Amino acid sequence: MNQRTNPKSSLRTGQRNKPRILNHYSAWKYVVLIATLCVMALSAIPTWYGENAAVQIGAKAGLTSTPLALQQALAEQGITTKRIDQSSHKTIVVLNDETQQAHAKAVLSTMVKDGSQVALALEPAAPMWLQSMGFAPIKLGLDLRGGVQFLLDVDIDQVFSAQTEQLADELRLQLRKEGIRSTSMTQTQSDTLAVSLPNSDANSAVRKFISKQYPQWQVRSSKGDGLYITMKESEQTQLRNLTVQQNLQTMRSRIEELGITEALVQRQGEHRIRIELPGVQDPAAAKNVIGATASLAFYEVKEAGTGSTMVVNDKDGRPVRVARKPVLGGDHIVDARGSLGEMGMPEVNITLDSTGGKIMSEFSRTHIGKPMATSYSEYSRDENGKASQSNEIISVATIQSQLGNRFRITGAGSLQDAQELALLLRAGSLTAPVTIVEERTIGPTLGAENIENGFAALGLGLGITLLFMACWYRRLGWVANIALVSNMIMLFGLLALIPGAVLTLPGIAGLVLTVGMAVDTNVLIFERIKDKLREGRSMAQAIDRGFDSAFGTIFDANFTTMITAVVLYSVGNGPIQGFALTLGLGLLTSMFTGIFASRAMINLVWGRDSRREVRI
């Protein structure tokens, strides 16, 4: 009986028996390796050039002088400049001598309308062709560059109290509509309202109203037919998170208005905000704006006995009766400019968003010929740490015609007062008062010393490691050394490329640790290769089996360390995040260079070596 053979089966068997080419990389892998190293090297180069001291003038500063006029004015004061870059967004004056930075800022502040828009800055010293490609130096943290750090406390009780007052006002209106009299309301705590009611029917009516209109509040009985109305815990948590988040955004906007770059603004704990301003050595201007809680609100002026009202004094101490609820708050202000009006009086020109413009238009249309008051509010703390709000009517004006989303107010004080108020309004009104509870200033000398000591430790560790690898593993040691240097280049390049990445002093410690982890990858691989050579395999076979057997161990070790780095970055802040960032990135680059780059070099040199009993 004849046996039939399947040609396809024979073909598959032939392919299966075809010997595998050892230690072979496709050409595209070498292209990817070389391209990656080139991009990372270009990204790392600007860091070695460092930065130049500079002064930044914001677009809203009102600068009218040309770059040549600025250069001449500074030269008259003995200040030399490298260059002046002017764009539609800002003007950068780069200085030759960093010790003249504060003097240059003082001179330039006299040449603009709004001196708060003039800020100290640092500009990359790298060649322009590198900067034009989008490469910039690594951003340095507060401990390396120097600067100022603020810790702010957000007074959440004021927010709870405002919510409770609003509930009380709405409840009074509802009781008045239903004809319920002989009631009284007292705010016993910031989140609790005590209501005294005449009978059980009133009690039921209030419970029904709260259940339907304010489900985020809970009602419990008190003496007689009275009630306690308390904000639920879930609502308190949500309101606290929203308030702190809104204040974070407002702080970031305010810092941007000041022209301060590379600032770090983040939440710390339940109701605190930490702000780091690297490079800022004169924190007075930043402190005045960051710590301020000024805001505007527009109120309808009322007569006594005409609904829910309150009395606020003007600047001369005269009482002005206004509606308890404002027509419009400062959160609808999108732009504000302080200037001199037609009569030479300081004024603030205000632009509202579309919602605010609609509200103001509707109100002013029905109140032509009636007065409207502008209230200025700010918060402060007494010696016991308790926050208090002070309100002041800065102007009472008669509405002459229907207003839109653009109008102006007067009575803010001097021109400087008007400009400072406009700055706060542009940056946004805080939803809760904040108080600076801690302030730290780190001088640039200490920052420079930290950089010098940190990189000295990195250089020493790197040098000793390179020497050990070259002596112990000889030819393969030089492969490891090239991979280690490539690893550091890639790590610096990644730190410069990633948005928001900041190098701190603990981050330098992470770099030193990365050196050990990177060379550990090569040590594991080389020891596996030596083991395979002792088994009698050829050099090519030992390389192939050595990389394969070491990969699992290397991956497991780096993966578990990466988990630690991710956890540190997630729960930590500031310096801890800086360490976690360099540690995590170092793990990725050490895997890339220790396995991929080392294998590529070894394949080219010893990948076809069939010798046995080779010493490495």
Image: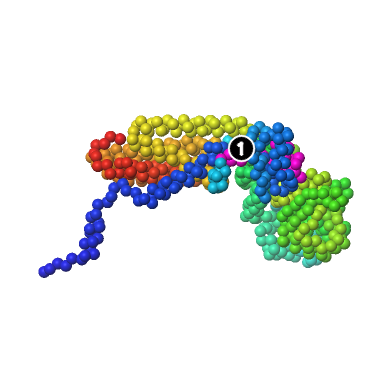
Q: Residue at x 66, y 32 (%)?
A: 99
Q: Is residue 248 left or right of residue 309?
A: left
Q: Residue at x 41, y 43 (%)?
A: 593
Q: Specify few, some or many for label 1: CA neighbours under 10 Å numbering under 14, 14-19, or 20 or more.
A: some
Residue 324 in view (yes/no): no
Q: Is residue 604 left or right of residue 156?
A: left
Q: Residue at x 84, y 57 (%)?
A: 372
Look at the numbered disc 1 and give the secondary structure of its residue.
Answer: strand
Query: Which picture quadrant has residue 57?
Result: top right
Above or below: residue 161 compared with residue 583: below
Q: Residue at x 54, y 31 (%)?
A: 452
Please tell me which residue lies in front, 409 or 45. 45
Please tell me which residue lies in front, 212 or 568. 568
Q: How is the image coloured?
A: rainbow
> Count of labels shown?
1
Residue 66 in view (yes/no): yes
Amino acid type of the residue that numbered disc 1 sits on in the rendered structure: Asn
> x, y percentage for residue 3?
14, 67
> x, y percentage for residue 327?
78, 59
Please tell me which residue lies in front, 385 or 320. 320
Q: Which residues are magenta?
A: 104-126
Q: Find out whether residue 122 is within the magenta segment.
A: yes
Q: Find out whether residue 79 is within the magenta segment.
A: no
Q: Quadrant of the C terminus?
A: top left
> x, y percentage for residue 441?
65, 35
Please tell me which residue lies in front, 184 or 274. 274
Query: Which picture quadrant has residue 464?
Result: top left
Q: Quadrant of the N terminus?
A: bottom left
Give the residue pinned by disc 1: 52
Q: Is residue 609 left or right of residue 335?
A: left
